[in-house]
Amino acid sequence: MSRQVVTRFAPSPTGMLHIGGVRTALFSWLFARKHGGRFILRIEDTDLSRSTDDNIRIIEDGMAWCGLTWDEGPVLGDPGSWKGPNGPYRQMQRMELYRAKIQELLDKGLAYRCRCSRAAIEERRKTVEAAGKVFQYNRGMDRGKGCADAGHDASEPAAIRFRMPEDGDIVVADLIKGDTRFPADSLDDWIIARTGEGPGDIGVPTYNFCVVVDDTDMEVTHVIRGDDHLNNTPKQIPLFAAFGTGLPAFAHVPMILGADGAKLSKRHGATSITEYQAMGLLPSAVRLALARLSWTPKIDGRAVESAEEELLTDEQMIQLFDLADCQKSAARFDMDKLQWLNQKLIQRSPWQELEPHLRPFMPESWTSKPDAWKAQAIQATQKGKSLTDMAEALRFAFERPAAFDEKAVEKFMTPAVKPALREVAALTGYGHYSPGLANRTGREADGPKGGAQEEHRHEALEAAFTAILERHGLKTKDLAQALRVALCGSPVSPGIYDTLMLVGPDEVAARLQRWL
RNA sequence: GGGGCUAUCGUCUAGGGGUCAGGACACCGCCCUUUCACGGCGGUAACACGGGUUCAAAUCCCGUUAGCCCUACCA
C-alpha cells in the first residue's frame, strides 16, 4: 500500500517568478495530478530582506496565471492564512519546528555546537590549502581542530553542525539522472543553524536543513526540483536518516538555458512569468512549451511525431507525463516553438475561451461590445501568433485611422475605384454575425452554423460587393484594398467582409466620406 | 583545486550494436489567395573529439574537450 503522492514547489520570493521555476513547478504539478496526489506550494522565505508579502503575492499570481493550482500552501491574496494540514507554508513561520528538530539532533548527538569563528576557519583553510589539499571542516588535515567532540564552553553563542558520515558512498537514486554516487569524504560537517543570539540559543536554520524538515513534515513523497540541487542531495540524505523517516524519491530536472546556451537571465529577454503573460501568450501554450523542454511525451511507447500530436491538452499531458521520459541534459529555451504553440492553441480555441485572455489587451470599449461582435472579431483574427497580435489587428475596429499609409493611398485610391467606394458607403444592414453563427469553432468547421439568417447577411454583403465590382469592372483586390486603406489606414486587415461587418455600415460610410 | 551532471540537424528531440540517423519548430522554395496571414506540398541541415571492444559503434568502455552545478553561518 503506497502512500498518496505528494510533490511540492518551494520557491523563494525574489520579486519575480522565474520561468525555470515555473517549469519545475509544472513537472511537480503534472506528476501529482497524474498520480492523483497533492501538490504543495511552500515559500522559502528565510532570506528576510526579500520576503515581503508583495513578493510572495507575485509567486502566487504567477502560479495561478499558469494554472498551476496548489492543494496546500498559502491562500492566494491572504498573506496570513494557508490551506492544508501541515502549515504554515512559509518557512519563517516554522521556526519553532526547526528549533525542535535541531534540539532533537543535538540531544541524539547527531549534531553539535560549533563556535569556530569565521576568522579561525579561514585561517585553517589557508593552512590546508597551502598544503595543496581541499579544506573540509573536521576532515582530513582539519580533523580534531574544530568543535566536533570538544566539550566546549556553552556560554558562547554557537552555530550548529550536522555530523556527516565519513566513509562509503552516498547514492542518490535519481528518477531522471539515474543512480549518482558521491564519496562521503567529499562532504563535511555542514552548518544546519547559524550562530545564535546568545548562549544556548539556536540561530536561524539553513536552507538545506529546512528543506529536509519541511519535506519530512509535509510528507513529500517525490522531490522534483532543479538539477542545481543534485549536489545538495547527498547532504540531505543523512539528515532524513537522522530523523528516522524514509527517503522521498528524487527527480532532478535539467535547467533551462538561454538561446545562447548560457544560464537564462534577463539579458536573454523574458525570464519572469509576468513577461510571458504580457507578451500575449496563453497560459496553456506556456505550459506546453515548458513541458516539452526536457520531456518527450510517449504515446504507446512512441515519441510524438507530428505537429498534431505536439499539441497536447492538459489532460493528455497529465496522462502521458513520466519522469522516465525526461531528458538529463539542459535545454535551451525556444521562443519560436512557444510562439508556434501559442498560435496553434489560439487557432483551435473557441472564442468564448479566448475572450477572457484577450480582454486585458483590448481597449476599454471592448467590454461593451455585444458577444456577436466579439465573436466575429476574435474569429477574424485567430490566425495571429499572440493575443497582442490579435489586439493590434483589431485596432481599426475601435478607432479611426490616425494616419494613412501613403504608398497604399497612392496605389489603391485610384479614380476608378471611387464610384465603387461610394456604393459601398451606401450599403446598409450588414452588421456583425450573431453569437449563434459565431459558435462555430473554426473556418468551415462542421457543427451548427448558426441561424440561416445570419449566414444570409454575410452572403448578402458578399453578393452586394460582387455586384459593385461587376458594375465598375473592378477586381476584388482593387476594391478590398481601397477599402482597407480608407477604413484602417493601411492595406492590411482581416478579410474584407469581416472588416466591413466589424466596423459596421454607419461607421464605414463615415470613414469613406473623405475619399469620395 | 575537489566532487557531481551533461554532450544527435540552428533549436527541442527519436533512436541504446547493423536505420538512406526519424519527427517537430525555425529557415528556404513552390502552391493557394481580396491584403497580412493561415493552410498544403517539398527542401537544406546533426551523432563534440580521440582511443578502444566488435565482423559491425550515434549506440558499449576509457580518455579528452566544452558547458553547467555544488564546494557559504546564500537559497
Image (cartoon, coloured by chain):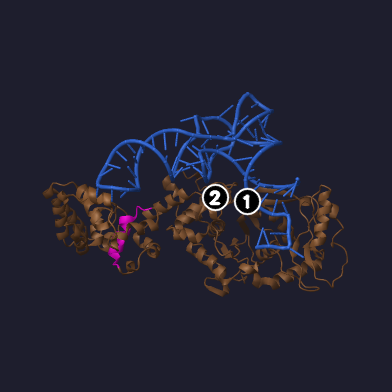
Left or right: residue A107 versus residue A405 is: right
Residue A282: x, y in percent? Answer: 43, 58
> Image quadrant of residue A119?
bottom right
| Residue contact between numbered discs 1 and 2, judged by CB atoms under 8 Å | no
Residue at horizontal 56 percent and vertical 54 percent from the top: A265
Q: Count the marks: how many?
A: 2
Residue at horizontal 70 percent and vertical 73 percent from the top: A96
Residue range of the region highlighted in magenta in the rendering: A369-384
Residue A401: x, y in percent? Answer: 28, 60
Give the residue type that dot 2 points to. Answer: Gly
Numbered badge on residue A258: 2
Asked which secondary structure carries label 2, the reply is loop
Depth order, front residue of B50/A442: B50
Residue identifier under label 1: A175
Whether residue A138 appears in this view of the structure is: no
Q: Chain of mark 1?
A: A
Residue A445: x, y in percent? Answer: 30, 52
Depth order, front residue of A452/A391: A391
